[in-house]
């Protein structure tokens, strides 16, 4: 389970420097937008959009450019993120709300519900996806990106090797687990099948591997910290300095390419159309 208070704290604390370090998230945003617009009918007017996890607003801004006549409700769990975007973003067509989407009651309906790199922080994925699908207008679209099972696979491997080397039997996790493409596709189908009026459920998905390179493992850890994406598992066991040093040494030894250490990001993209 994710500790949502920790999520709020970490993202709020790092809101001012998020854009400087969120390189993969920005690339995902560009792919998500292209995926959203692909094969869409031109005659559907977009009037109402819900954005989940608006963060510092780089997706929000793009949506205002693509759909200048639409009203956007942009929500984020972190007060610091909402304060950051409101201090720099002035557009009367956007309402910013600081709330956890998993707790938010949706009284309106939307032509598009969209989210970039946020769903990995959900504790109740099936329930939330069902709620978001229900809030779509006919022909509306739920479009989101999130991280998949191979994300940080180098770090996960180093955690496992460090446990073996130090003879640690207790569970220690580098972060929350992520879904595979097939697992998340099945979850989406099961979550909305009772809401689909017995029609075929229209789900498109794709996966892309992205890589980021750092001078060393400490720089990699620092980058994660500066985006606010710290380990926020409720059950996370505290790790000793000895264990972390072992992880860092293993990472620097085993995942060096051209004098840089490598980090994998497994990016999943979904588009669900309501018929």
Image: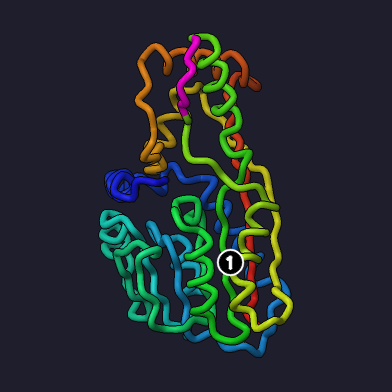
Quarter of the C terminus within the rendering:
bottom right
Measured as percent of width and height from the top left, residue 94 is found at 37, 76
User: How busy is the neighbourhood of tag 1: few (under 14 within 10 Å), some, or many (20 plus)?
Assistant: some
Q: Residue at x 62, y 59 (%)?
A: 187
Is residue 121 part of the magenta span, yes or no?
no
Asked if 245 appears above or below 9 in the picture, the reply is above
Which element type, helix, strand or loop, lies under badge 1?
A: helix
* Quadrant of residue 55 within the rendered picture: bottom left
Asked if 72 appears above or below 213 in the picture, the reply is below
Q: Viewed as shown, does residue 245 lie left or right of 111?
A: left
Is residue 171 part of the magenta span, yes or no?
yes
- The magenta region covers 167-172
Measured as percent of width and height from the top left, residue 75 is found at 37, 66
Measured as percent of width and height from the top left, residue 38 is found at 70, 71
Comparing 167 with 174, the one in front is: 167
Measured as percent of width and height from the top left, residue 184 is found at 63, 55
Comparing 275 with 253, the one in front is: 275
Q: Residue at x 60, y 71 (%)?
A: 192
Give the total of numbered labels. Answer: 1
* Quadrant of residue 245 within the rendered picture: top left
The coloring applied to the image is rainbow
Q: Residue at x 65, y 83 (%)?
A: 197
Q: Residue at x 49, y 81 (%)?
A: 110
What main secondary structure does the magenta stretch of the protein show?
Answer: loop
Quarter of the N terminus within the rendering:
top left
Q: Label 1, on which residue?
A: 191
Asked if 9 appears above or below 186 in the picture, the reply is above
């Amino acid at each position: 389970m994710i500790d949502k208070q920790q999520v709020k704290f970490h993202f709020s604390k790092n809101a001012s420097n998020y854009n400087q370090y969120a390189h993969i998230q920005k690339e995902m945003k560009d792919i998500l937008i292209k995926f959203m617009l692909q094969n869409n009918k031109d005659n559907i007017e977009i009037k109402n959009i819900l954005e989940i996890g608006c963060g510092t607003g780089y997706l929000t801004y793009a949506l205002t450019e693509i759909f200048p006549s639409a009203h956007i409700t942009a929500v984020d769990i972190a007060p610091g993120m909402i304060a950051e975007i409101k201090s720099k973003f002035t557009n009367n067509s956007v309402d910013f709300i600081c709330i956890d989407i998993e707790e938010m009651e949706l009284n309106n309906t939307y032509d598009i519900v969209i989210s970039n790199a946020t769903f990995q922080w959900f504790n109740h994925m099936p329930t939330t996806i069902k709620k978001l699908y229900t809030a779509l207008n006919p022909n509306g679209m739920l479009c989101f990106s999130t991280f998949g099972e191979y994300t940080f696979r180098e770090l996960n491997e180093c955690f496992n090797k460090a446990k073996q080397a130090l003879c640690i039997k207790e569970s220690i996790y580098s972060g929350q687990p992520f879904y595979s493409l097939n697992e998340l596709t099945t979850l989406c189908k099961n979550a909305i099948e009772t809401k689909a009026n017995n029609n075929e459920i229209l789900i498109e998905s794709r996966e892309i591997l992205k890589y980021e390179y750092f001078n060393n493992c400490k720089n990699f850890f620092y980058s994660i910290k500066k985006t606010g994406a710290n380990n926020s598992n409720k059950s996370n066991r505290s790790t000793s300095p000895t264990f972390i040093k072992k992880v860092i040494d293993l990472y620097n030894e085993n995942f060096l390419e051209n004098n840089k250490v490598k980090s994998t990001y497994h990016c999943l993209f979904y588009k669900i159309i309501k018929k």
